[in-house]
């Protein structure tokens, strides 16, 4: 697993955006695994900016998002809405090629990814407790797309996006640890002190208690973070 520390948000986002765009240039029908949350927002802005500048064609790209809330009364808080308004509406990806896990498609999501050729590049954020997607601590190593009960900590952390904590959905559909590990390349973004413990644990022993520790066993995984998120790592 590679660690890249870049404090400047613009430079960090541009570096990651360039990785995504060079993949799409090289492989116009690339399969992207995409994430939501505040961590990838700047990267998506850079993808939009550079794709426009360099005329990058996303019309044959397919995407599979990591997760989606269940029983979410507010569409503007859905991950579909997030992706439309932060990325999809501003590049020429075809909406029918953008996928989200759902209750109805629970059993077939991993199969669909396989049929599309597998994820070439998976973008990830990380929860303060080390969760990725909505794979909360102690999600089995071999899990595929499944229904996840969100922990109190995650509900609390995600409540900042909702009017009240009571509005935060308590369940989601998420790709599992195995589904994420299957990606050919993984990029995880983590910034701020709030993520320092999670990053320390990610570099520790691969275990079920820290879902992100699966990156340790992945042949092509890179963590992009700032000094704060890396502050508990030994030199
Ligand atoms: C949510 C998402 C995760 C994301 C995490 C961290 O729980 N399901 O995919 O990584 O939040 O979000 P943020 O980047 O806003 O800190």
Image (spheres, rainbow, N blue to C red):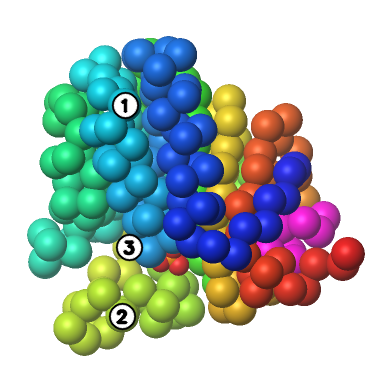
Q: Does any atom of ligand 1 lie closer than 8 Å to the CB of label 1?
A: no
The answer to whether residue 16 is magenta is no
103 displayed left or right of 141 = left
Residue 123, percent from left and from top: 48, 43
- List the residue tagged with mark 3: 171
Question: Which comes before the other along the chain, label 2 or label 1?
Answer: 1
Report the quarter where the C terminus lies: bottom right
Mark 3 residue element:
strand
Q: Tell whether label 1 touches label 3 (CB within 8 Å).
A: no
Q: Tell whether label 1 touches label 2 (CB within 8 Å).
A: no
Mark 2 residue element:
helix
Q: Tell whether label 3 touches label 2 (CB within 8 Å).
A: no
Report the quarter where the N terminus lies: top right
Q: Residue at x 47, y 22 (%)?
A: 23
Number of numbered discs present?
3
- List the residue tagged with mark 2: 160
Nearest to the eye among marks 3 and 1: give it. 1
Q: Is residue 146 visible?
A: no
Residue 54, disc:
1
Q: Is residue 219 visible?
A: yes
**Label 3 neighbourhood size at 10 Å, few (<14), some (14-19), many (20+)?**
some
Magenta part of the protein: which range? 199-205
Q: Does any atom of ligand 1 lie closer than 8 Å to the CB of label 3?
A: no
| Rendering quadrant holding ligand 1 | bottom left
Q: Residue at x 61, y 78 (%)?
A: 193
Residue 131 lies, with reference to residue 89, above or below; the image says below
Q: Residue at x 58, y 25 (%)?
A: 184
Distance from the alpha carbon under mark 2 to that under mark 3: 17 Å
């Amino acid at each position: 697993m590679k660690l890249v520390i870049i404090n400047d948000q613009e430079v960090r986002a541009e570096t990651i955006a360039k990785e995504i765009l060079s993949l799409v240039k090289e492989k116009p029908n690339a399969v992207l695994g995409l994430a939501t949350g505040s961590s990838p927002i700047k990267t998506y802005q850079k993808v939009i900016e550079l794709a426009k500048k360099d005329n990058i064609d996303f019309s044959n790209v397919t995407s599979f998002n990591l997760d989606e809330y269940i029983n979410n009364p507010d569409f503007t808080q859905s991950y579909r809405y997030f992706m439309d308004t932060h990325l999809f509406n501003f590049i020429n990806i075809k909406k029918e090629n953008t996928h989200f896990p759902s209750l109805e498609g629970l059993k077939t999501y991993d199969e669909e990814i396989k049929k599309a050729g597998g994820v070439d590049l998976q973008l990830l954020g990380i929860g303060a407790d080390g969760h990725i997607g909505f794979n909360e601590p102690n999600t089995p190593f071999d899990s595929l797309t499944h229904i996840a009960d969100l922990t109190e900590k995650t509900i609390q952390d995600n409540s900042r996006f909702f009017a009240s904590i009571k509005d935060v959905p308590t369940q989601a559909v998420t790709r599992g640890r195995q589904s994420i590990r299957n990606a050919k390349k993984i990029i995880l973004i983590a910034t701020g002190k709030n993520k320092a413990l999670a990053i320390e644990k990610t570099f520790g022993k691969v275990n079920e208690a820290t879902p992100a520790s699966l990156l340790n066993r992945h042949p092509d995984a890179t963590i992009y973070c700032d000094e704060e998120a890396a502050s508990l790592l030994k030199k």
